Image: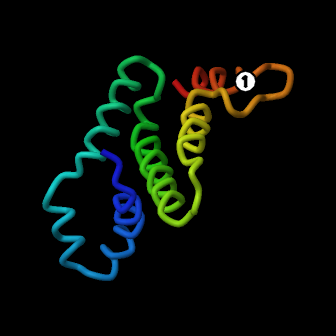
Amino acid sequence: MHDPSLAAFLSSLPIEMQREPSIAEAMAAEPSPVLAVVARMVDRGVRAGDIARRDAPRVIAVFLACTMGLSLYAATMESDDFLETMKAFLALLEGGLVRDGDRGGKRALSTRRRAR
């Protein structure tokens, strides 16, 4: 089910949490399923050797920040191409959106290897 109001809600939630302490308290009391999914995903990346253990908290933070930004984008842009935006975001994560000169996008892989 696609509910366009969900993006608007998610994008405004951080602001509402700052504005209204009871919302922040409720969010802190109830573990976030989104955070749990992202944490499990990052943990799998750590175990597979794709993410350095010391970088795991930063990867989680960046991923959540990006998804919050995407929620805000979806809530405020009058556009039907959000699916294309999500495809571009996934391509960016997979190293296929930005190329590094003649090396054909291999920079992300070499950076990952150095981070271990």
> What's the coloring here?
rainbow
Count numbered badges in the picture. Answer: 1
Amino acid on which the number 1 mark rests in the picture: Gly
User: What secondary structure is marked by label 1?
Assistant: loop
Which residue is located at x 59 percent, y 44 percent? Answer: 85
State the image quarter where residue 17 is shown: bottom left
Q: Position of residue 108 (x, y in %)?
A: 65, 27
Give the side of residue 48 with respect to residue 96, left or right.
Answer: left
Image x and y of residue 27, in percent: 21, 63
Locate residue 57 relative to residue 116 in the image: left or right: left
Q: Quadrant of the N terminus?
A: top left
Mark 1, Cα crowd under 10 Å, few <14 / some 14-19 / many 20+, is some
Q: Is residue 20 above or below residue 50?
A: below
| Residue found farthest to the bottom | 19
Residue visible at 38% across and 32% down in the picture: 42
Q: Is residue 114 left or right of residue 52?
A: right
